[in-house]
Each structure stands twice: as structure tokens, then as C-alpha cells.
Image (cartoon, rainbow, N blue to C red):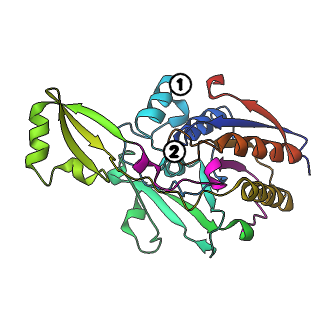
Amino acid sequence: MKNKATIPLFIVEEHNEAFYIWINFLKHRKDKKNYTLLHFDDHSDMTTLRVNTPLENVFEWSDKKLSRFTYEELTIASFIKVASFIGVFNKIIWCKVDHKVKMKKDFFITSYNNDAKNLISGNQLDANPLLNNPHQIVNYEIVGLKDFEEHDAKKVLLDIDLDFFSCIIQPENNNEIIIEVSEEEYLNFNHDKYHPIRFICNSIQSRVHENSYFLIINYYQDIFPSPRKVSEAIIKKRIQDFIGKLKEFSINPDLITICRSVYSGYTPRDQWRFIEQELKNGLSQIYKMRENSIASF
């Protein structure tokens, strides 16, 4: 199978940027909604977000507004639910390479008092008063690669994270961050064992150096290897199996996004180039693609 139509391919650094690509890609199309998302990733990226910018008329936003929202309000774990809220997806298949049991977990998504900012999502679809408000219902499946199948999707966006093939778990624990604070905030932190910042960081300590005050996030003496990082041989086999599934079910996406996830640390820094090249080589066997830059919009 080699698709005759040229498929746009965008490679992004981090996954919130996929939202920026999707909106820019769809805004000029007559048919903007009710797509199927095929999401191949070690993570679901399905958290529900609160934002300050109302999610209204998103396809009419200026590039400046869309870019600001993407980088200042979206996260790498929430972009899919936001796209679902505005109706881009009515079906999502999340494929995690070694997921064991196929699961179906349809969900609704709405917003508090129809404010289009405080998103609310859940799986209770019957007798739910929240569904009296405007909402979206999304068919959601979780599946492993060996059990992946898709027979009837006609409008598909294909989204691939390189960490699908080899992954670092909890990379944030390996990223030490040093923040300089005022003496007052330093004292507040040390005198308050329930300081709010203690609950949003896995590890945080304070230090004084040459009359300057610092908070150190994620200070650990040891770094442990990730059990989800695999060898190049396994990566190549996973890519072959992945391409095989796309061929088997004649997946014909309108758009392909590939996320590197290197800055966030989820894709191993010593493997991402190998994974990306092998993946592009595999995709080129079945698709005619045109690689684009996020700067092209």
C-alpha cells in the first residue's frame, strides 16, 4: 500500500505543539470536526485542563493568539482533551506498545457553567446532569500494538510520539532546577512544612549561597535507569510492527504528526535520532509524505 495523495508530515519538539498544527491544518478545511485520532504514545496525554483563554471560535484565532495559548496554557499532557472539547475528535484510539488488555472508555467533555475555560470530563454518560450543558462525547479505546485494529475510520489524524518505541519514565526527576528566591520566600518555605510548592514537586530543598537564596527542585544523588528504555533491535522490531499495522488496516491519514519529546526527557537523548529516522523510513514505504516545519504556518 502506497497512498497516492501526498500527506503532510509535521515533526514537533513537544506534544502541546500538535494542537497548534491541528488547528492550523484544519482551519482552512471545510470539514474541521469529528476526526479519529490514532495516538501512538507511551502516555495517554489525556489530562483535563483549566485555561484562562475561553475555548471559543478557536479556528478563528490569530496565529499570535493560538501560539501564545499553545506555549503558555497548554501542556504536553492536555492537548488532546482540549481538541476534543472543540469537536476536533469524536474517536480516539490510544495505542501503548505493550498494553495488555483492550479497553473501551468513552468519555464526555464539557465546561463549568459553559465558561469554555474550566473543562470537566468523565465516563458517566447516563443520567449525568453535566450532560445538560453543551458537551462532546468521544469514543475512546486503549489498546496494545498487537491488538490494534481500525476498520472504518475515514477521517484520521495520525499522531506518533517517539517515546512509543523507547521511553524514559519520570524524566522530570532527572532534571534539577535551581530557582533564586527572595529571603522572605526562603524563610516562608523553611518555616512552613505545608508550603504549597511542596505538593507540586517530587523533591524540593532550599539552599543559601553567598547571601543568595535558592530552591532546588529534583535534587537526587542517584539516577536510576528506565525500565522502558529498550535496545535498538527492539526499537526496529517495534517500528516494523507499527508500519505493518498501518498497512494491514489501510490507515490513510489526512495528517501525520511526530513528536520528539526530547526536551521533556521522555525519549532517550541517545536514541531519538535513530528512532526518528527509522520511523520516517518506515512511513515512507507506505505513504507519500511532504515534511513541513511548524514555522510554515
* Location of residue 47 by image quarter: bottom left
Tag of residue 41: none
Q: x%, y% of residue 176?
A: 37, 41
Q: Residue at x 59, y 72 (%)?
A: 104
Q: In screen coordinates, is 113 left or right of 9?
A: left
Residue bearing the label numbered 2: 265
SS class, disc 2: loop
Q: x%, y% of residue 85?
A: 49, 50
Residue 174 visible here? yes
Q: Quadrant of the C terminus?
A: top right
Q: x%, y% of residue 143?
A: 65, 68
* Location of residue 32 by image quarter: top right
Q: Residue at x 54, y 57 (%)?
A: 43
Q: x%, y% of residue 162?
A: 65, 48
Q: Is residue 226 magenta?
A: no
Q: Which residues are magenta?
A: 148-175
**In-front residue for pair 290/199:** 199
Residue bearing the label numbered 1: 63
Instruction: Kindly identify the amino acid type of the residue bearing the numbered disc 1.
Output: Asp
